[in-house]
Amino acid sequence: MRCKPRVNEQRSISTRVRTWRKSEIPFDSFPAQCDLQRGTDRVQLLPGIAVSPGVAIGEVLVIDNEGFRIPRRFVARDAVDDELERLSQAISAVEAQIGRDRDTITAKVGAQYGAIFSAHLTLLADPKLRSELEQMVRDRHYSPEYAVSRTLRRYAKAFQSLDNPYLAERAVDLFDIEKHLLRNLTGRRRGELANLVSPVIVLAHTLTPSETANLDRRFVLGFATETGGAGSHTAIVAQGLEIPALVGIGPFLSDVSGGDVAIVDGDHGQIIVQPDEETLAHYRREREQHQTLATRLRELRDLKAQTADGQRIELLGNIEFPHEAEHCNARGSDGIGLYRTEFLYLGAETEPTEEDHYRAYASVVEQVGDRPVVIRTLDLGADKMAHLPLPSDEANPVLGLRSIRLSLRNVPLFRTQLRAVLRASALGDVRVMFPMITTVTELRQAKMVLADVMEDLDDAGIAFHRKIPVGMMVEVPAAVMLIDRFLEEVDFISIGTNDLIQYTLAVDRGNRDVASLYNPGDPAVLRLIEMAIAAANRAGKPVNMCGQMSSNAFYTMLLIGLGLRRLSATPGAIPEVKKVCRSVTVPQCEQLAGRVMALDNARDVATLVREELKKVVPELVA
Ligand code: PEP
Ligand code: MG
């Protein structure tokens, strides 16, 4: 929800208009009241939603809402005096700034509100705080940024841990002061994420799909965010990057300081901050086992995805960027089953031109050779590329003007893309696919625009494949309900479970609060999948699955049992999926599917699937 009810806003203002009594100032009284040493140094195990497997161990880089980077940095012995001076100047500047804020607010809305800032000034002027900060720089040689962050967060954390809601709220004031000082000391923001020079685990309140895509894989070992759900595009991009990742942890950043050590366990969905030696040793072993398994799976590269009884399964790759085609090739994929072209917009300041589109598509086709490349037309909107000039006042963007709806409202943009797709079709086995088709009329309109663009290219004498296969995503329950009609009008379909789950179960794929309901194994979702596969098989039309469900080897047996013979997965998942395909027989899978479809809840489905999978590929079952 973008808008909060007004009543909450008012409540938050009145809460903030409390000032600090002298006796409450923490810097003197706290050591007596609570054990500060236990503040952030304690081992913490935080559950989250695993979105990309593997284990990462390293020092953390905290990117909070304001985007500050607070590494544990030391200053050289001979620079200590200069750093102390810098700290002192920052404190003075912040004092002056807070004083100005107090005067402005007092003049605008009254002294009662200005008092908040007076309280901040009192805290900032406290000699105990100041001497503690200076001591950290002078004696421990910490940078002023790190000293500020560590000290104020410790106090804030100690306040939060008290069993007193009134005092716990006071932590906010300490975070405010921390931000003021850091803003002054660093003057740098989130952009620094792009300039990393050493390996880190990124911890952030939130990461957008574009920020995630821009993470530098040389230095980002893994990441974890407070927000987000399993089906979010941030999660999908993380899989593409092949780094362990968790989302939806909930508020935890105030407990962590830059430089702390953390483990991201992308297999079991947890992050461990400040692990003890035993935990570290355990995870180092896990990391090695991952590497060993990856090496073994790499040996499958040149083998086909074929069941033990000879059924060929077409195993394709999902990509967001042209260079990922190489990642698919490296795993021996049968082609590209989903190219999410909207990622062309990522970081683009201006609308991509026909040439931009064409160059990207041509590059993919060139890398993939004579194997198929399914280019999906723009699926913009909702959480994808939200910085674009899209409608911003939609109450429910996932139900709004996104995807094919947006393309059909912006025909020139749609035509530009289709011209490029068609031109690329002259270079190889290119297929075009429309996203989020909900009505037959919509599909017909999209095909009409395609036919129109073909005429234009004809008139201009530009080469293209006239019989380019045209497909649609099946990712809205309405499309499954009318699947027989749709199948009469397309050459192939591809099941998009990410959205299908969201729209079937009425659960926002990016919302951590309802993440436990977002489940590919829900019988309602499985029934829709079964219906779509059966209808396509009856009609003799190819059916693929390109949602994340097909990237999860856990479901491979079930999907084969439901009649699927084409799967499109993120490149990193291809070896595991192939391993399952090669370890099972079709009757084995069909038997499993038959038993699963008799169940009525996702938990029983998971238990049964795990049992069967464990029998055939125990090494893949956590
Ligand atoms: C899907 O919805 O399953 C899908 C593949 O599309 P996207 O994740 O890009 O919305
Ligand atoms: Mg989708």
Image (cartoon, rainbow, N blue to C red):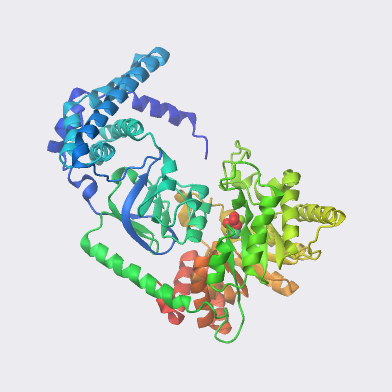
**512 is higher (above) or lower (below) than 81:** below
Position above or below: 214 against 64: below
**Which residue extends farthest left?**
32
Q: Position of residue 144 (x, y in %)?
A: 26, 36
At x 44%, y 81%, the residue is 615
Residue at the outermost right position:
459
Residue drawn at (15%, 31%) of the image: 28
Q: In which quarter of the image is the C terminus?
A: bottom left
107 left or right, relative to 484: left
Task: Indicate the position of residue 16 as horizontal and vertical percent values.
Answer: 34, 26
Q: Which of 194 and 413 is in front in this view?
A: 194
Task: Name the residue: 40% across, 28% down.
Answer: 11
Farthest residue to the top: give it: 107
In the image, what residue occupies the spot 46% across and 81% down? 616
In the picture shown, does residue 287 fall above or below 127? Answer: below
Name the side, left or right, on which 599 lies relative to 16: right
Q: Which of 188 and 58 is in front in this view?
A: 188
Q: In this rendering, does residue 125 appear at all? A: yes
Q: Does any portion of residue 19 appear in the rendered image?
A: no
Left or right of residue 49: residue 98: left
